[in-house]
Amino acid sequence: GGRSLAEQSSAPEGAWQGTDVDDITPEQPSFRPARTPGVQLVGTSQYTVLQLFQLFMSNKILQTVLNNSNKFGEADHPETFQRITMPDMMSYLAMIIYMGIIDTPNITDYWRRSELYTFSFPSSVMSGRRFKAISRAIHISDPDDDAANDLKRGTAGYDRLCKIKPMYNEVKQVCMANYHPRQCIAIDERMVASKARNGLRQYMKNKPVKWGYKLFVLADSTNGYTWDFFVYEGKGSPIVKGLAYDIVMRLVNTPVLGTGYKLFVDNFYTNPGLFRDLLAKKIWACGTIRQHQIGFPKDRPGGLERRAPRGTIRWIRKGPVVFVQWRDTRDVLMCSTIHAAHGEDTTQRRVKGADGQWSVQDVPIPPAIKDYNKNMGGVDLSDALIGYYTILHKTKKWYRSFLFHFIDIAIVNEKVMSQKAFRETLVTELKAVGSTTTAPPQAPPPAPPGASHKPVHFSQDGSAGRRRCVHCHQRTTVKCSSCDKCLCFTINRDCYNAWHNLKKDLDSGVQELVES
């Protein structure tokens, strides 16, 4: 009982062994999570779909985005900006989630009056012009913090994630607060698609989304719940024991997570030294491994032969870590602290016989590979669920891609019904909140008392300074010369009406003079 795993195994030291040599099954983890695994909600409470969504997109998060968007909008285009209210924000969320369900080539198509585009829902939520105005102003961080951070560019104090930090940190916290993972977990990369270029943008040729921002994610293997994640900040990020090692240790936070977990990773992370250190933290691990990884016994005799048939297994144990070679359509290399090298498990494969005929046969499969295939896809499952109805839109501002992705995480992490049904119900409830409590639009500033409104051109150049008229929707170069606070009489409805009424009075006065 006191012997090491290497002593308990009957394999001779140093060579790859076959299934004729027995291996031992390592001691299985005693699962001690920090909380009861599963959803962390009050069991007797009944939640609406909107209430479930607000567990992740809380009023605190939305109010922060609202305040910062108003601050940014007032600074960016003070003359035309109308402050965003919370009902506006709810209506805006309803629209961007709706756009993930119903896709059109252009955002303006949702409000088109055409036989081909007969969408009645968008105009019942908000006007297309209001949607564009909010999209232009939406901002996650405080503009003052952005300005202070920009002054630090090029120094160690510069924060590359400053523009997403308020929402980024809050979403991470609520994801961990509202759920606790079951025993099998997985760590993998996720790409957030974006064409906005900055130092955070990455390329990954093996991912469906090849250009975008890279997130490292810890997910529950059973349902793809995104429990913890962080954004990769590029090559300038501090590295202690190697990038893959640091990523795993950062996400596997045992004081918050607990112990006895089974972690599944791909060959980017798998390292025998990492697996031993995880075992010291009472986290068991399994993953594919590269042949040239440090610690892999590639130069030992007895490995897979070139003509070995499908299902052939070779293995070496080094203390608590077992290395496995398995012949499938290609050679699969595994490393595990959870499994024995081989067992009774089989899988079905099409095999060509000596007579040249193909047939389906049961071939041996190592327990490590069978468990890996079952549990490694947690992050990929979450990515697939997000991809079905993603709200991600094209944007020139990189931080807005994260805003959309965080909303997608909040939706996908809910498992009460199908994704489509959840989103449809959520859109309806968000619209109801936005429409029933919507305050009337903020009136533009009034003209000075007694001011006469006189139209003049913005500049002598007719191609400069054009703005769209709210009355006829045409571009114009004309503005009001005497309204300092209003914008232009063709854009400001009150100013336009005042000018129009004045013009009517003048016309009627002239008519009276003519008649007299």
Image (tube, rainbow, N blue to C red):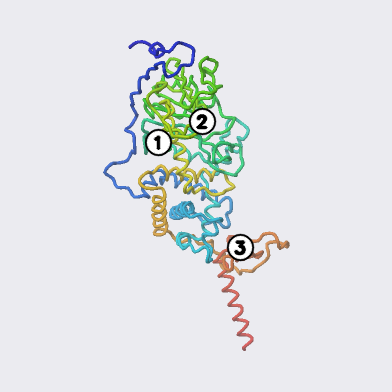
**Residue positioned 60% across, 81% down in the render:** 509
Residue 267 picture location, percent across and down? 51, 27
Q: Which-is-in-front pick, marks 2 and 3?
A: 2
Say which amino acid is labelled 3: Arg
Locate the N terminus and report the quarter of the image it occupies: top left
Closer to the chain start, of discs 2 and 3, is: 2
Question: According to the image, label 1 marks what residue?
Answer: 176
Q: Nearer the viewer, residue 505 or 476?
A: 476
Closer to the chain start, of discs 1 and 3, is: 1
| Label drawn at residue 329 | 2
Furthest-bottom residue in this view: 516
Locate the C terminus and report the quarter of the image it occupies: bottom right
| Label drawn at residue 468 | 3
Q: What secondary structure is marked by label 2?
A: loop
**Mark 1 and 3 residues: CB-CB less than 8 Å, in contact?**
no
Q: Is residue 22 left or right of residue 400?
A: left
Mark 2 vs mark 3, CA separation in Å: 63 Å
Residue 149 picture location, percent across and down? 57, 37
Say which amino acid is labelled 2: Thr
Residue 191 picture location, percent across and down? 53, 39
Furthest-left residue in this view: 44
Q: Crowdedness of circle 2 by 10 Å Cα count: few (<14), some, many (20+)?
A: few
Q: What secondary structure is marked by label 1?
A: helix
Mark 1 vs mark 3, CA separation in Å: 47 Å
Number of numbered discs on residues: 3
Furthest-front residue in this view: 355
Residue 198 picture location, percent across and down? 61, 39
Residue 481 appears in view? no
Determine whether 235 is above or below 476 in the image.
above
Determine whether 172 is above or below 274 in the image.
below
